[in-house]
């Protein structure tokens, strides 16, 4: 293993904080989409742990209110972005975004909104697929880093401008399986 690999530094958001907040988001989403079919559209790969826990939280919220029924379907997209100095990132679709989204309620599930280019691109791409509604749920948001106006409907946590890893988020494909969010220490 390389000795220059950075190490996760301080825990920024603990496991229990993540659990509690995701439970709240699940309750809110199950209220907002009561008796509807909802397509959860996960953005690979960073959102996978959040996606899985959020989907379960939406279900659990229904158990506490038996009159509530949200039928949830899973879809995924994978994107790539190129950061070129100070120029805006160019985002491209690698796969996903099926025709099934037509006339459906779609909730984009993101790990983190930084510059906002990814969410802006995805909203524009989805418009071509003619969904009934599109909303965005992100676990983390760095509001000080937005470069484009971006509408976010559900935010887990606002965080400062720090590079974070864990709970799905990586550094060079490492640390995705940390059960908490941590800042990364420089080598
Ligand atoms: P945006 O298009 O909003 O600038 O970037 C969103 C994407 O950048 C995220 O989905 C994520 O892949 C990556 N990203 C932005 N900030 C961080 C961060 O602090 N840590 C990690 N691991 N990825 C980040």
Image (cartoon, rainbow, N blue to C red):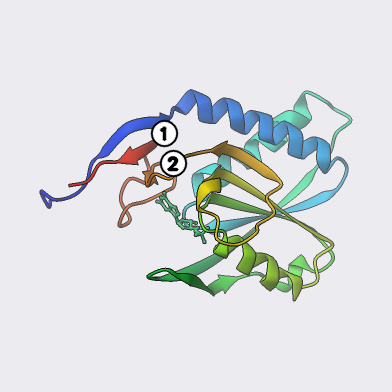
Describe residue 72's horizontal placement relative to residue 96 as left or right: right
Residue 74: quadrant of the picture: bottom right
Q: Residue 38 carries which label?
A: none
Q: Is residue 179 visible?
A: no
Residue 119: quadrant of the picture: bottom right
> What residue is drawn where x is 60% and y is 47%?
138
Residue 75 in the image: x percent, y percent?
A: 64, 60
Count up the numbered dots: 2
Residue 183 in the image: x percent, y percent?
A: 35, 39
> What residue is drawn where x is 58% and y is 25%?
20
> What residue is drawn where x is 75% and y is 66%?
101
Judge by depth and name the residue closer to the eye, 152 or 47: 152
Residue 124, compared with residue 22, is above or below; it is below
Residue placed under numbered mark 2 in the picture: 167
The disc, 2 or 1, on the residue closer to the chain's N-terminal end is: 2
Residue 37 in the image: x percent, y percent?
A: 82, 51
Tag 2 near tag 1, CB within 8 Å: yes
Residue 156, compared with residue 113, is above or below; it is above
Query: In 3D space, how far apart are the residues under numbered discs 2 and 1 (Cα atoms)?
Result: 6 Å
> What residue is drawn where x is 47% and y is 57%?
45
What is the secondary structure assignment of the residue under circle 2?
A: loop
Q: How crowded is mark 2: few (under 14 residues within 10 Å), some or many (20 or more)?
A: many
Residue placed under numbered mark 1 in the picture: 180
Residue 4 in the image: x percent, y percent?
A: 13, 50
Describe residue 169's horizontal placement relative to residue 126 as left or right: left
What is the secondary structure assignment of the residue under circle 1?
A: loop
Q: Residues within 10 Å of mark 1 (few under 14, many from 20)?
A: many
Judge by depth and name the residue closer to the eye, 40 or 116: 116
Residue 185: quadrant of the picture: top left
Residue 120, compared with residue 164, is above or below; it is below
Q: Can residue 99 be seen in this view?
A: yes
Q: Confirm if mark 1 falls within 8 A of ligand 1.
A: no
């Amino acid at each position: 293993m390389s000795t220059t690999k950075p190490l996760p530094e301080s825990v920024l958001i603990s496991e229990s904080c993540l659990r509690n907040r995701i439970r709240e988001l699940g309750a809110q989403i199950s209220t907002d989409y009561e008796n509807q079919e909802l397509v959860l559209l996960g953005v690979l790969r960073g959102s996978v742990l959040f996606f899985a826990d959020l989907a379960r939280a939406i279900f659990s919220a229904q158990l506490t209110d038996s009159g509530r029924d949200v039928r949830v379907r899973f879809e995924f997209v994978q994107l790539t972005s190129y950061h070129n100095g100070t120029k805006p990132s160019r985002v491209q679709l690698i796969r996903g975004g099926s025709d099934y989204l037509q006339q459906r309620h779609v909730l984009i599930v993101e790990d983190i909104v930084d510059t906002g280019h990814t969410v802006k691109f995805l909203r524009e791409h989805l418009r071509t697929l003619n969904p009934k509604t599109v909303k965005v749920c992100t676990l983390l948001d760095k509001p000080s880093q937005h470069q484009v106006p971006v509408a976010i409907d559900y935010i887990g946590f606002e965080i400062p401008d720090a590079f974070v890893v864990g709970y799905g988020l990586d550094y060079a494909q490492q640390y995705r399986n940390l059960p908490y969010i941590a800042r990364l220490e420089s080598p």
